[in-house]
Image (tube, rainbow, N blue to C red):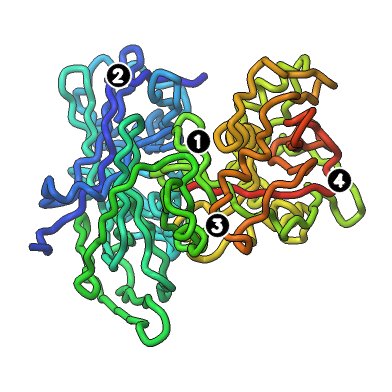
Protein backbone atom coordinates (compact mmCIF):
# COMPACT_ATOMS: atom_id res chain seq x y z
CA UNK A 1 0.00 0.00 0.00
CA UNK A 2 1.25 3.50 -0.81
CA UNK A 3 0.67 6.48 1.41
CA UNK A 4 -0.41 9.47 -0.69
CA UNK A 5 0.32 12.96 0.59
CA UNK A 6 -1.75 15.83 -0.78
CA UNK A 7 -0.04 19.08 -1.65
CA UNK A 8 -1.17 21.94 0.57
CA UNK A 9 1.44 24.45 -0.53
CA UNK A 10 3.94 24.63 -3.37
CA UNK A 11 7.44 25.86 -2.77
CA UNK A 12 9.89 26.52 -5.58
CA UNK A 13 13.18 24.67 -5.48
CA UNK A 14 15.42 27.62 -6.19
CA UNK A 15 19.09 27.27 -7.09
CA UNK A 16 20.44 30.48 -5.57
CA UNK A 17 24.21 30.18 -5.56
CA UNK A 18 26.62 32.71 -4.04
CA UNK A 19 29.55 33.18 -1.72
CA UNK A 20 29.90 36.95 -2.32
CA UNK A 21 32.72 36.32 -4.73
CA UNK A 22 30.99 38.51 -7.27
CA UNK A 23 30.63 42.55 -6.97
CA UNK A 24 7.55 22.28 -2.04
CA UNK A 25 5.69 20.84 -1.46
CA UNK A 26 3.41 19.78 1.43
CA UNK A 27 2.60 16.17 2.29
CA UNK A 28 0.04 14.86 4.76
CA UNK A 29 -0.73 11.50 6.39
CA UNK A 30 -2.78 10.49 9.40
CA UNK A 31 -0.72 10.94 12.57
CA UNK A 32 2.36 11.84 10.53
CA UNK A 33 3.64 15.42 10.35
CA UNK A 34 2.87 17.58 7.36
CA UNK A 35 6.10 17.88 5.37
CA UNK A 36 7.16 20.99 3.48
CA UNK A 37 10.23 20.98 1.25
CA UNK A 38 11.89 24.04 -0.24
CA UNK A 39 15.33 25.10 -1.36
CA UNK A 40 17.05 27.20 1.28
CA UNK A 41 19.51 28.59 -1.27
CA UNK A 42 23.27 28.94 -1.25
CA UNK A 43 25.26 30.89 1.31
CA UNK A 44 25.05 34.67 0.98
CA UNK A 45 22.48 34.60 -1.82
CA UNK A 46 21.25 37.99 -2.97
CA UNK A 47 17.78 38.67 -4.28
CA UNK A 48 19.27 40.00 -7.52
CA UNK A 49 20.87 36.59 -8.16
CA UNK A 50 17.67 34.60 -8.35
CA UNK A 51 18.07 33.82 -12.05
CA UNK A 52 19.66 30.45 -11.20
CA UNK A 53 16.39 28.75 -10.44
CA UNK A 54 14.50 25.52 -10.89
CA UNK A 55 11.34 24.12 -9.33
CA UNK A 56 10.33 20.78 -7.89
CA UNK A 57 8.12 19.08 -10.46
CA UNK A 58 6.34 15.78 -10.97
CA UNK A 59 8.83 12.93 -10.92
CA UNK A 60 11.26 14.54 -8.48
CA UNK A 61 12.30 12.30 -5.60
CA UNK A 62 13.68 12.95 -2.12
CA UNK A 63 15.10 10.43 0.34
CA UNK A 64 14.16 10.59 4.04
CA UNK A 65 15.80 9.15 7.18
CA UNK A 66 14.45 9.29 10.72
CA UNK A 67 16.63 8.80 13.80
CA UNK A 68 15.24 8.00 17.23
CA UNK A 69 17.64 8.46 20.13
CA UNK A 70 20.59 8.33 17.72
CA UNK A 71 19.48 5.19 15.88
CA UNK A 72 18.12 5.08 12.33
CA UNK A 73 14.51 3.97 12.26
CA UNK A 74 13.97 0.67 10.54
CA UNK A 75 10.74 1.98 9.05
CA UNK A 76 12.04 5.32 7.74
CA UNK A 77 15.48 4.45 6.41
CA UNK A 78 16.12 6.10 3.04
CA UNK A 79 12.43 6.16 2.16
CA UNK A 80 11.69 7.62 -1.27
CA UNK A 81 8.99 10.26 -1.76
CA UNK A 82 8.02 10.89 -5.40
CA UNK A 83 6.20 13.99 -6.64
CA UNK A 84 3.18 13.11 -8.79
CA UNK A 85 0.88 15.45 -10.69
CA UNK A 86 -2.68 15.04 -9.43
CA UNK A 87 -4.48 17.54 -11.64
CA UNK A 88 -4.84 19.85 -8.64
CA UNK A 89 -1.12 20.21 -7.97
CA UNK A 90 1.61 17.84 -6.89
CA UNK A 91 1.11 14.96 -4.51
CA UNK A 92 3.88 12.89 -2.94
CA UNK A 93 3.80 9.11 -2.79
CA UNK A 94 5.95 7.19 -0.30
CA UNK A 95 7.39 3.78 -1.10
CA UNK A 96 5.61 2.21 1.84
CA UNK A 97 3.02 2.81 4.52
CA UNK A 98 4.42 5.18 7.12
CA UNK A 99 4.13 4.61 10.86
CA UNK A 100 1.82 6.72 13.00
CA UNK A 101 3.71 9.37 14.95
CA UNK A 102 1.99 11.11 17.82
CA UNK A 103 5.03 13.24 18.67
CA UNK A 104 8.61 13.85 17.59
CA UNK A 105 10.24 13.60 21.01
CA UNK A 106 13.71 12.12 20.67
CA UNK A 107 13.39 11.99 16.90
CA UNK A 108 15.20 13.84 14.12
CA UNK A 109 14.45 13.59 10.41
CA UNK A 110 16.95 14.20 7.61
CA UNK A 111 16.20 14.54 3.89
CA UNK A 112 18.27 14.75 0.73
CA UNK A 113 17.72 15.35 -2.97
CA UNK A 114 17.86 13.68 -5.45
CA UNK A 115 16.88 10.25 -4.15
CA UNK A 116 18.94 7.16 -4.92
CA UNK A 117 18.42 3.64 -3.61
CA UNK A 118 22.19 3.14 -3.41
CA UNK A 119 23.95 6.01 -1.68
CA UNK A 120 27.63 6.29 -2.68
CA UNK A 121 28.78 6.26 0.98
CA UNK A 122 27.48 5.55 4.47
CA UNK A 123 25.52 8.06 6.51
CA UNK A 124 26.71 8.92 10.04
CA UNK A 125 23.97 8.45 12.68
CA UNK A 126 26.24 9.94 15.36
CA UNK A 127 26.30 13.34 13.62
CA UNK A 128 24.44 16.27 15.14
CA UNK A 129 23.03 17.71 11.89
CA UNK A 130 22.40 16.87 8.26
CA UNK A 131 25.78 18.22 7.17
CA UNK A 132 27.53 15.65 9.31
CA UNK A 133 24.96 12.90 8.72
CA UNK A 134 25.47 13.15 4.94
CA UNK A 135 29.15 14.27 5.02
CA UNK A 136 30.61 11.12 3.46
CA UNK A 137 27.73 10.94 0.97
CA UNK A 138 28.36 14.53 -0.15
CA UNK A 139 32.10 13.88 -0.56
CA UNK A 140 31.39 10.82 -2.70
CA UNK A 141 28.41 12.22 -4.62
CA UNK A 142 28.95 11.64 -8.36
CA UNK A 143 28.66 14.64 -10.65
CA UNK A 144 28.22 13.98 -14.35
CA UNK A 145 30.90 15.18 -16.76
CA UNK A 146 28.13 15.79 -19.27
CA UNK A 147 25.49 17.95 -17.56
CA UNK A 148 24.03 19.32 -20.79
CA UNK A 149 20.88 17.29 -20.23
CA UNK A 150 18.81 18.93 -17.51
CA UNK A 151 18.16 15.58 -15.83
CA UNK A 152 21.90 14.90 -15.51
CA UNK A 153 22.45 18.42 -14.21
CA UNK A 154 19.85 18.12 -11.46
CA UNK A 155 21.02 14.58 -10.61
CA UNK A 156 24.43 16.08 -9.84
CA UNK A 157 23.06 18.71 -7.45
CA UNK A 158 23.11 17.05 -4.02
CA UNK A 159 21.07 18.86 -1.33
CA UNK A 160 20.40 18.00 2.32
CA UNK A 161 18.30 19.28 5.20
CA UNK A 162 17.31 18.68 8.81
CA UNK A 163 13.59 18.68 9.44
CA UNK A 164 12.35 21.47 11.71
CA UNK A 165 9.04 20.79 13.43
CA UNK A 166 6.66 23.75 13.66
CA UNK A 167 3.38 22.64 15.15
CA UNK A 168 2.23 19.78 12.95
CA UNK A 169 4.50 20.75 10.06
CA UNK A 170 7.96 19.32 9.43
CA UNK A 171 9.92 21.80 7.30
CA UNK A 172 12.93 20.89 5.15
CA UNK A 173 15.02 23.84 3.95
CA UNK A 174 17.44 22.22 1.53
CA UNK A 175 21.12 23.25 1.46
CA UNK A 176 23.20 22.70 -1.66
CA UNK A 177 26.33 20.65 -1.08
CA UNK A 178 27.98 21.08 -4.48
CA UNK A 179 29.63 24.14 -6.07
CA UNK A 180 28.19 25.82 -9.15
CA UNK A 181 30.42 27.33 -11.82
CA UNK A 182 28.31 29.66 -13.97
CA UNK A 183 30.18 30.55 -17.17
CA UNK A 184 28.90 33.71 -18.87
CA UNK A 185 29.66 34.08 -22.58
CA UNK A 186 28.46 36.69 -25.08
CA UNK A 187 24.89 35.77 -25.97
CA UNK A 188 21.51 37.05 -27.08
CA UNK A 189 18.43 36.88 -24.87
CA UNK A 190 14.91 37.01 -26.27
CA UNK A 191 12.51 38.58 -23.79
CA UNK A 192 9.03 37.60 -24.93
CA UNK A 193 6.39 40.31 -24.64
CA UNK A 194 3.33 38.06 -25.04
CA UNK A 195 0.44 39.16 -22.85
CA UNK A 196 -1.76 36.07 -23.23
CA UNK A 197 0.88 33.53 -22.20
CA UNK A 198 3.87 33.81 -19.87
CA UNK A 199 7.05 32.62 -21.57
CA UNK A 200 10.53 32.38 -20.04
CA UNK A 201 13.46 34.19 -21.63
CA UNK A 202 15.24 32.39 -24.46
CA UNK A 203 19.02 32.54 -24.92
CA UNK A 204 21.01 32.16 -28.15
CA UNK A 205 24.56 30.82 -27.93
CA UNK A 206 27.64 32.31 -29.58
CA UNK A 207 28.63 30.67 -32.86
CA UNK A 208 30.73 27.47 -33.01
CA UNK A 209 30.70 27.08 -29.26
CA UNK A 210 32.87 24.26 -27.91
CA UNK A 211 33.61 23.02 -24.40
CA UNK A 212 36.70 20.97 -23.57
CA UNK A 213 36.20 17.96 -21.30
CA UNK A 214 32.88 19.05 -19.83
CA UNK A 215 29.35 19.84 -20.98
CA UNK A 216 27.35 22.40 -18.97
CA UNK A 217 23.61 22.91 -18.70
CA UNK A 218 22.28 26.00 -20.47
CA UNK A 219 19.98 27.99 -18.21
CA UNK A 220 17.27 30.36 -19.40
CA UNK A 221 19.32 33.36 -18.25
CA UNK A 222 22.08 32.43 -20.71
CA UNK A 223 24.51 31.04 -18.13
CA UNK A 224 26.34 27.76 -18.71
CA UNK A 225 25.93 26.00 -15.37
CA UNK A 226 28.30 23.23 -14.26
CA UNK A 227 28.22 21.55 -10.84
CA UNK A 228 31.48 20.52 -9.18
CA UNK A 229 32.01 18.37 -6.09
CA UNK A 230 34.38 20.31 -3.82
CA UNK A 231 35.75 17.02 -2.47
CA UNK A 232 36.72 15.79 -5.93
CA UNK A 233 39.79 16.32 -8.08
CA UNK A 234 40.56 19.88 -9.24
CA UNK A 235 38.63 20.82 -12.37
CA UNK A 236 39.72 23.12 -15.20
CA UNK A 237 36.99 24.49 -17.46
CA UNK A 238 37.89 25.65 -20.95
CA UNK A 239 36.43 26.14 -24.39
CA UNK A 240 36.23 28.40 -27.41
CA UNK A 241 33.72 30.18 -29.63
CA UNK A 242 33.67 32.18 -32.85
CA UNK A 243 34.96 31.29 -36.29
CA UNK A 244 37.77 32.03 -38.71
CA UNK A 245 40.12 34.71 -37.41
CA UNK A 246 37.74 35.47 -34.57
CA UNK A 247 38.00 32.21 -32.61
CA UNK A 248 38.40 33.05 -28.92
CA UNK A 249 39.62 30.51 -26.36
CA UNK A 250 39.05 30.75 -22.61
CA UNK A 251 40.06 28.85 -19.46
CA UNK A 252 38.98 29.12 -15.82
CA UNK A 253 40.17 27.21 -12.76
CA UNK A 254 37.39 27.13 -10.15
CA UNK A 255 38.14 26.99 -6.44
CA UNK A 256 34.99 25.12 -5.39
CA UNK A 257 33.40 25.66 -1.99
CA UNK A 258 30.41 23.62 -0.84
CA UNK A 259 27.14 25.52 -1.08
CA UNK A 260 28.55 28.38 -3.15
CA UNK A 261 28.62 29.57 -6.72
CA UNK A 262 30.79 31.85 -8.83
CA UNK A 263 30.08 33.58 -12.14
CA UNK A 264 32.97 33.47 -14.61
CA UNK A 265 32.38 36.29 -17.09
CA UNK A 266 34.33 35.60 -20.28
CA UNK A 267 35.60 38.50 -22.42
CA UNK A 268 33.46 41.01 -20.51
CA UNK A 269 30.44 39.21 -21.92
CA UNK A 270 27.23 41.19 -22.20
CA UNK A 271 23.83 39.97 -23.26
CA UNK A 272 22.11 41.51 -26.25
CA UNK A 273 18.43 41.75 -25.33
CA UNK A 274 15.73 41.44 -27.99
CA UNK A 275 12.11 42.06 -27.07
CA UNK A 276 9.89 39.88 -29.22
CA UNK A 277 6.27 38.79 -29.31
CA UNK A 278 6.39 35.08 -30.09
CA UNK A 279 3.71 34.12 -32.61
CA UNK A 280 2.60 31.07 -34.52
CA UNK A 281 4.16 31.52 -37.95
CA UNK A 282 7.43 33.06 -36.72
CA UNK A 283 10.51 31.81 -38.54
CA UNK A 284 13.14 29.76 -36.67
CA UNK A 285 16.70 30.09 -37.99
CA UNK A 286 19.62 27.66 -38.04
CA UNK A 287 21.42 29.50 -35.22
CA UNK A 288 18.31 29.37 -33.03
CA UNK A 289 17.30 32.98 -33.57
CA UNK A 290 13.80 34.12 -34.52
CA UNK A 291 12.24 36.27 -37.22
CA UNK A 292 8.73 37.65 -36.94
CA UNK A 293 6.15 36.12 -39.28
CA UNK A 294 5.58 39.72 -40.37
CA UNK A 295 9.20 40.23 -41.48
CA UNK A 296 9.55 41.29 -45.10
CA UNK A 297 10.09 38.64 -47.76
CA UNK A 298 13.61 39.83 -48.59
CA UNK A 299 14.77 39.43 -44.97
CA UNK A 300 13.21 35.99 -44.59
CA UNK A 301 14.41 34.85 -48.00
CA UNK A 302 18.01 35.80 -47.25
CA UNK A 303 17.97 34.09 -43.83
CA UNK A 304 18.79 30.46 -43.10
CA UNK A 305 15.30 29.43 -42.04
CA UNK A 306 14.96 25.86 -40.78
CA UNK A 307 11.49 25.91 -39.26
CA UNK A 308 8.25 27.72 -38.45
CA UNK A 309 6.73 28.08 -34.98
CA UNK A 310 3.39 26.26 -34.87
CA UNK A 311 2.61 26.03 -31.15
CA UNK A 312 3.16 28.34 -28.16
CA UNK A 313 0.31 27.15 -25.94
CA UNK A 314 2.00 25.38 -23.00
CA UNK A 315 -1.08 23.18 -22.53
CA UNK A 316 -0.41 21.65 -25.97
CA UNK A 317 3.30 21.04 -25.37
CA UNK A 318 4.18 17.60 -24.04
CA UNK A 319 5.62 16.82 -20.64
CA UNK A 320 8.54 15.14 -22.41
CA UNK A 321 9.46 18.37 -24.19
CA UNK A 322 9.16 20.34 -20.96
CA UNK A 323 11.34 17.89 -19.04
CA UNK A 324 13.98 17.83 -21.79
CA UNK A 325 14.30 21.62 -21.63
CA UNK A 326 14.25 21.90 -17.85
CA UNK A 327 10.69 23.24 -17.84
CA UNK A 328 11.92 26.25 -19.80
CA UNK A 329 10.02 25.61 -23.02
CA UNK A 330 8.78 28.34 -25.36
CA UNK A 331 7.22 26.70 -28.38
CA UNK A 332 7.22 23.99 -31.04
CA UNK A 333 8.69 24.38 -34.51
CA UNK A 334 7.89 22.49 -37.72
CA UNK A 335 10.81 21.89 -40.08
CA UNK A 336 10.58 23.71 -43.39
CA UNK A 337 12.14 20.72 -45.14
CA UNK A 338 10.98 17.12 -45.37
CA UNK A 339 13.46 14.47 -44.27
CA UNK A 340 15.82 13.61 -47.11
CA UNK A 341 14.10 16.06 -49.47
CA UNK A 342 11.09 13.73 -49.73
CA UNK A 343 12.95 10.47 -49.30
CA UNK A 344 10.43 7.89 -47.95
CA UNK A 345 11.22 5.93 -44.78
CA UNK A 346 9.82 2.95 -42.93
CA UNK A 347 8.62 3.30 -39.32
CA UNK A 348 10.02 -0.03 -38.08
CA UNK A 349 11.37 -3.17 -39.71
CA UNK A 350 14.15 -5.43 -38.43
CA UNK A 351 16.84 -7.35 -40.31
CA UNK A 352 14.50 -10.31 -40.89
CA UNK A 353 11.78 -8.12 -42.36
CA UNK A 354 9.58 -8.31 -39.27
CA UNK A 355 7.62 -5.11 -38.71
CA UNK A 356 5.59 -6.04 -35.63
CA UNK A 357 6.66 -5.04 -32.16
CA UNK A 358 4.83 -4.29 -28.93
CA UNK A 359 5.99 -0.78 -28.04
CA UNK A 360 3.72 -0.71 -25.00
CA UNK A 361 6.56 -2.68 -23.37
CA UNK A 362 8.58 0.53 -23.24
CA UNK A 363 5.74 2.87 -22.30
CA UNK A 364 4.35 3.87 -25.71
CA UNK A 365 0.57 3.67 -25.83
CA UNK A 366 -1.39 2.24 -28.76
CA UNK A 367 -4.32 4.44 -29.81
CA UNK A 368 -7.47 2.72 -31.08
CA UNK A 369 -10.88 3.80 -29.82
CA UNK A 370 -14.28 2.15 -29.86
CA UNK A 371 -15.05 4.00 -33.10
CA UNK A 372 -13.21 6.37 -35.40
CA UNK A 373 -14.35 9.54 -33.64
CA UNK A 374 -13.27 8.17 -30.28
CA UNK A 375 -9.94 7.30 -31.89
CA UNK A 376 -9.67 10.91 -33.08
CA UNK A 377 -10.18 12.18 -29.54
CA UNK A 378 -7.52 9.79 -28.24
CA UNK A 379 -4.85 10.62 -30.82
CA UNK A 380 -5.57 14.34 -30.62
CA UNK A 381 -4.56 14.14 -26.96
CA UNK A 382 -1.26 12.48 -27.86
CA UNK A 383 1.16 15.41 -27.77
CA UNK A 384 4.11 13.39 -26.44
CA UNK A 385 6.13 13.13 -29.64
CA UNK A 386 9.45 13.83 -27.97
CA UNK A 387 8.87 11.24 -25.26
CA UNK A 388 8.01 8.56 -27.84
CA UNK A 389 11.16 9.37 -29.81
CA UNK A 390 13.23 9.29 -26.60
CA UNK A 391 11.81 5.94 -25.52
CA UNK A 392 12.59 4.38 -28.88
CA UNK A 393 16.06 5.91 -28.95
CA UNK A 394 16.91 4.81 -25.39
CA UNK A 395 14.81 1.71 -24.68
CA UNK A 396 15.40 0.24 -28.14
CA UNK A 397 18.96 1.58 -28.35
CA UNK A 398 20.61 -1.37 -30.13
CA UNK A 399 17.86 -1.63 -32.74
CA UNK A 400 17.74 2.14 -33.14
CA UNK A 401 21.47 2.23 -33.89
CA UNK A 402 21.09 -0.75 -36.23
CA UNK A 403 18.63 1.27 -38.30
CA UNK A 404 15.49 -0.73 -37.52
CA UNK A 405 13.59 2.51 -36.80
CA UNK A 406 14.54 4.33 -40.02
CA UNK A 407 12.36 7.45 -39.83
CA UNK A 408 13.21 8.04 -36.16
CA UNK A 409 16.93 7.66 -36.79
CA UNK A 410 16.81 9.98 -39.80
CA UNK A 411 15.01 12.59 -37.71
CA UNK A 412 17.51 12.36 -34.86
CA UNK A 413 20.53 12.56 -37.16
CA UNK A 414 19.17 15.60 -39.01
CA UNK A 415 19.87 17.96 -36.08
CA UNK A 416 22.91 20.22 -36.13
CA UNK A 417 25.13 20.58 -33.07
CA UNK A 418 23.81 24.13 -32.61
CA UNK A 419 20.20 22.98 -32.51
CA UNK A 420 21.01 20.10 -30.16
CA UNK A 421 22.55 22.62 -27.74
CA UNK A 422 19.59 25.01 -27.90
CA UNK A 423 16.60 22.75 -28.42
CA UNK A 424 15.37 19.18 -28.17
CA UNK A 425 16.70 18.59 -31.67
CA UNK A 426 14.47 17.36 -34.48
CA UNK A 427 12.09 14.47 -33.81
CA UNK A 428 9.04 12.81 -35.35
CA UNK A 429 5.82 14.51 -34.18
CA UNK A 430 3.00 12.65 -32.48
CA UNK A 431 -0.49 12.52 -33.98
CA UNK A 432 -1.78 15.37 -31.80
CA UNK A 433 1.22 17.53 -32.69
CA UNK A 434 0.53 16.92 -36.38
CA UNK A 435 -3.06 18.03 -35.84
CA UNK A 436 -1.76 21.25 -34.28
CA UNK A 437 0.37 21.87 -37.38
CA UNK A 438 -2.73 21.43 -39.53
CA UNK A 439 -4.82 23.68 -37.27
CA UNK A 440 -2.34 26.44 -36.55
CA UNK A 441 -0.41 26.67 -39.82
CA UNK A 442 -2.98 25.11 -42.15
CA UNK A 443 -5.82 27.21 -40.78
CA UNK A 444 -8.49 24.52 -40.34
CA UNK A 445 -10.25 23.68 -37.09
CA UNK A 446 -10.50 19.85 -37.38
CA UNK A 447 -13.85 19.82 -35.62
CA UNK A 448 -16.91 17.62 -36.16
CA UNK A 449 -17.93 19.43 -39.35
CA UNK A 450 -16.49 17.54 -42.29
CA UNK A 451 -15.44 14.57 -40.15
CA UNK A 452 -15.90 11.23 -41.88
CA UNK A 453 -15.55 7.75 -40.39
CA UNK A 454 -13.73 4.84 -41.90
CA UNK A 455 -12.33 1.92 -39.92
CA UNK A 456 -12.21 2.30 -36.10
CA UNK A 457 -8.55 3.19 -36.57
CA UNK A 458 -9.06 5.61 -39.46
CA UNK A 459 -10.89 8.85 -40.22
CA UNK A 460 -10.66 11.93 -42.39
CA UNK A 461 -12.09 15.39 -43.06
CA UNK A 462 -13.34 16.47 -46.45
CA UNK A 463 -14.22 19.70 -48.23
CA UNK A 464 -12.18 21.89 -45.86
CA UNK A 465 -10.21 24.92 -46.90
CA UNK A 466 -6.98 23.25 -47.98
CA UNK A 467 -4.58 23.05 -45.01
CA UNK A 468 -1.89 21.95 -47.45
CA UNK A 469 -2.07 25.32 -49.19
CA UNK A 470 -2.25 27.10 -45.84
CA UNK A 471 0.97 25.50 -44.59
CA UNK A 472 2.72 26.27 -47.86
CA UNK A 473 1.54 29.88 -47.60
CA UNK A 474 3.11 30.11 -44.14
CA UNK A 475 6.43 29.10 -45.76
CA UNK A 476 6.03 31.33 -48.81
CA UNK A 477 8.74 33.82 -47.79
CA UNK A 478 11.32 31.08 -47.18
CA UNK A 479 13.89 30.62 -49.95
CA UNK A 480 13.50 27.58 -52.21
CA UNK A 481 16.72 25.98 -50.97
CA UNK A 482 15.51 26.13 -47.37
CA UNK A 483 12.10 24.49 -47.80
CA UNK A 484 10.11 21.66 -49.32
CA UNK A 485 6.53 22.66 -50.03
CA UNK A 486 3.90 20.13 -49.02
CA UNK A 487 2.88 18.04 -52.02
CA UNK A 488 -0.64 16.99 -52.92
CA UNK A 489 -1.49 13.53 -51.53
CA UNK A 490 1.62 13.48 -49.36
CA UNK A 491 1.59 10.99 -46.50
CA UNK A 492 3.65 11.69 -43.37
CA UNK A 493 4.50 9.39 -40.48
CA UNK A 494 3.52 10.29 -36.94
CA UNK A 495 5.25 8.88 -33.85
CA UNK A 496 1.91 7.45 -32.66
CA UNK A 497 1.10 3.75 -32.82
CA UNK A 498 -2.22 1.96 -33.35
CA UNK A 499 -1.29 -1.71 -32.91
CA UNK A 500 1.87 -3.78 -32.62
CA UNK A 501 2.28 -3.78 -36.41
CA UNK A 502 0.67 -0.45 -37.35
CA UNK A 503 1.56 3.21 -36.83
CA UNK A 504 -0.39 6.32 -37.77
CA UNK A 505 0.14 8.73 -40.62
CA UNK A 506 -1.31 12.07 -41.73
CA UNK A 507 -2.30 12.59 -45.36
CA UNK A 508 -2.89 16.02 -46.92
CA UNK A 509 -4.74 16.80 -50.16
CA UNK A 510 -5.83 19.95 -51.98
CA UNK A 511 -9.45 18.89 -52.40
CA UNK A 512 -11.83 16.14 -51.34
CA UNK A 513 -10.45 14.27 -48.34
CA UNK A 514 -8.24 17.15 -47.23
CA UNK A 515 -6.90 15.64 -44.01
CA UNK A 516 -6.58 11.89 -43.44
CA UNK A 517 -5.49 10.09 -40.29
CA UNK A 518 -4.84 6.42 -40.99
CA UNK A 519 -3.13 3.45 -39.36
CA UNK A 520 -0.87 1.54 -41.73
CA UNK A 521 1.80 -1.14 -41.56
CA UNK A 522 5.09 0.02 -40.10
CA UNK A 523 6.98 -1.50 -43.04
CA UNK A 524 5.37 1.00 -45.43
CA UNK A 525 7.46 3.81 -46.91
CA UNK A 526 6.16 7.28 -46.07
CA UNK A 527 7.61 10.78 -45.63
CA UNK A 528 8.94 12.34 -42.46
CA UNK A 529 8.48 15.99 -41.44
CA UNK A 530 10.14 16.80 -38.11
CA UNK A 531 9.47 19.19 -35.27
CA UNK A 532 11.52 20.49 -32.34
CA UNK A 533 10.86 22.23 -29.04
CA UNK A 534 12.85 25.28 -27.93
Q: Nearer the viewer, mark 3 or mark 2?
A: 3
Q: Callout 2: few (<14), some (14-19), or many (20+) C-alpha neighbours within 10 Å?
A: some
Choose between 26 and 217: the one closer to the eye.
217
Residue 390, percent from left and from top: 61, 47
Check if mark 3's residue and mark 2's residue have beta carbons within 8 Å: no
Q: Residue at x 52, y 36 (%)?
A: 318
In the image, taking residue 375 as reference, residue 416 lies left or right, namely left
Choose between 340 and 474: the one closer to the eye.
474
Residue 470, percent from left and from top: 62, 38
Q: Earlier in the sequence, mark 4 or mark 1?
A: 1
Q: Which residue is mark 3?
A: 306
Q: Earlier in the sequence, mark 3 or mark 4?
A: 3
Tell which residue pokes out farthest to the bottom in this image.
245
Q: Earlier in the sequence, mark 3 or mark 2?
A: 2
In the image, taking residue 39 as reference, residue 460 lies left or right, namely right
Tell which residue pokes out farthest to the right in this image.
352
In the image, taking residue 215 as reference, residue 371 lies left or right, namely right
Q: Callout 3: few (<14), some (14-19), or many (20+) C-alpha neighbours within 10 Å?
A: some
Q: Which residue is mark 1?
A: 317
Disc 3 from disc 4: Cα separation: 27 Å
Q: Residue at x 40, y 21 (%)?
A: 98
Vertical arrangement, residue 259 with respect to residue 457, above or below:
below
Quadrant of res 365: top right
Choose between 158 and 266: the one closer to the eye.
266
Mark on residue 524?
4
Mark on residue 8?
2
Disc 1 from disc 2: Cα separation: 26 Å
Q: Nearer the viewer, mark 1 or mark 2?
A: 1
Amino acid sequence: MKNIFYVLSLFSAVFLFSCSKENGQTVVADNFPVIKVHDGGYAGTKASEEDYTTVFTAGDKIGVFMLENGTISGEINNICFTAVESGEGLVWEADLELPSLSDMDGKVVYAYYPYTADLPAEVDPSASDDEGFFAAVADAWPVAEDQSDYADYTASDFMTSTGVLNGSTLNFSMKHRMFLAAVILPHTIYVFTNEDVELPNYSILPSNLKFEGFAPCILSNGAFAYLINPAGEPVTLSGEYGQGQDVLAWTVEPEPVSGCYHRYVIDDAEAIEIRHELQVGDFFLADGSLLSKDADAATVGSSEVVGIVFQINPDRIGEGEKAALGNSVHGLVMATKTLGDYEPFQWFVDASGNYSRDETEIGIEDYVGSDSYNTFLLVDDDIEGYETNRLIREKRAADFEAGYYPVFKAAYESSSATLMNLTTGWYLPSNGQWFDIVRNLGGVALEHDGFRSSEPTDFYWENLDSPLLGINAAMSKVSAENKNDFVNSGYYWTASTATSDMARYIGLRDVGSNVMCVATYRKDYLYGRCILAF
